[in-house]
Amino acid sequence: METLTYVSCEKQIDSDAKTRTLTIRCYVYLPLTAPAPPLCLSPDRELTAEAMTLLMQVDNELLAARADWDEDRFRRLMRLRPKAGCRLRRRWEQLNPKPRIPLGTLRRRYHANLAGHSYDQNS
């Protein structure tokens, strides 16, 4: 198998007081550091990737809402999360050929009160 390399050349003009020098520097990049070709996905895999991205964004927003102690935003995001998970599961099952890795469970514990597990209710 032939390995391809990527060569990049840059021109640099050094303008000192009396002399102007032109320097050409060439760099050779190995195939691992060369820019990757754009990834082309089939339409069903692209929709699945978008559904997975949506679920990951909702999870990140949940972490931010919990950190801000914003119970209303947390509650709204937890109502949205099952819909995003359902969309991802539906798209995952429609993939052909089936992925080698199973999707697994997308469940997340929910408690409407963010601090409900931290404090004793009897005191």
Image (cartoon, rainbow, N blue to C red):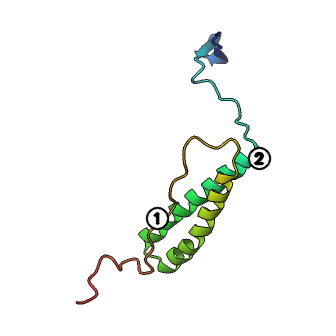
Above or below residue 16? Residue 71 is below
Q: Using the numbered discs, state the Cα–Cα distance from disc 2 to disc 1 in whole angstroms.
A: 31 Å
Q: Disc 1 on helix, strand or loop?
A: helix
| Residue farthest along the right direction in this orientation | 43
Q: Which three-letter amino acid code belongs to the residue tagged 2?
A: Pro
Q: Residues within 10 Å of mark 1 (few under 14, many from 20)?
A: few
The percent coordinates of residue 35 (x first, y second) are 65, 28
The residue tagged 1 is 63
Q: Which mark, residue 101?
A: none
* Residue located 57% across and 23% down the image: 32
Between 30 and 112, the one lying in front of the other is: 112
The residue located at (55%, 51%) in the rendering is: 103
Front residue of 54 and 67? 54
Q: How many marks?
A: 2
Which percent across, then down, holds residue 37?
A: 70, 30
Say if 25 sits above or below 55 in the image. Answer: above
Quadrant where the C terminus sits is bottom left
Residue named by callout 2: 43
Q: Amino acid at mark 1?
A: Leu
Q: Look at discs 2 and 1 and give the one toward the viewer.
A: 2
Quadrant of res 2: top right
